[in-house]
Image (cartoon, helix red, strand yellow):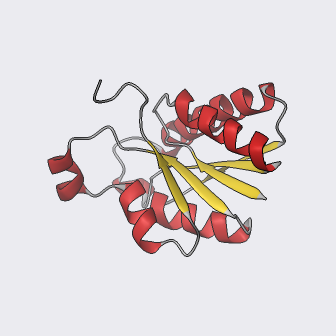
Amino acid sequence: MRIVLAAKPGADQPWVADAVIDLARQTGASVAVVAVDAVELERLAAAPRSVSADRAEEAVAAAAQRIAGAGIEVTTTVLPGRPLEGILGFAESEAADLVVVGSSGRPAVAQRLLGSVPLELIKKSARPVLVITHPHRGS
């Protein structure tokens, strides 16, 4: 089994990696962690691509370190471009059995206006998508 974990640049979401660890232990899966820098056109970006790429690198490194620390085989990839397309394409290239993503921290109104990568993944992915919410949200 192959799990793709879509890490969100700039977000600290260790509970998502923990959920992937549990799934991988139960299924014997390997894990590929991917983050997309979210820079479609660098000349229109608020900051150089390197800033966004660094945030993406930090996100995949944090998730991979946690997963590898649990003794699970893990690879990392950072891609340029739009998150939805990057994650979908990566999951396809990896022949992922499951795509795991953390829930957005944005309020529902902002998600409707600005879009949500987890919601769009659910709508457009040909592969199963598991959205992990923060364990303390709503308590």
Instruction: Inspect this view and state whether residue 21 appears.
Output: yes
Q: Is residue 10 above or below residue 126?
A: above
- Residue, x 54% and y 30% (percent of image)? 15
| Residue closer to the observer: 119 or 48 | 119
| Residue closer to the observer: 93 or 97 | 97
| Residue closer to the observer: 21 or 86 | 21
Indicate the quadrant where residue 69 lies.
top right
Residue 134 vs residue 128: left or right?
left
Q: Is residue 50 above or below residue 134?
A: below
Q: Position of residue 52 (x, y in %)?
A: 49, 41
Indicate the quadrant where residue 139 lies.
top left
Q: Position of residue 76 (x, y in %)?
A: 73, 45
Of all residues, the one furthest to the front in this rendering is: 26
Instruction: Inspect this view and state whether residue 82 appears.
Output: no
- Residue, x 56% and y 40% (percent of image)? 56
- Residue, x 36% and y 59% (percent of image)? 119
Q: Position of residue 23 (x, y in %)?
A: 69, 44
Q: How many marks?
A: 0
- Residue, x 43% and y 60% (percent of image)? 40
Residue 71 vs residue 47: left or right?
right
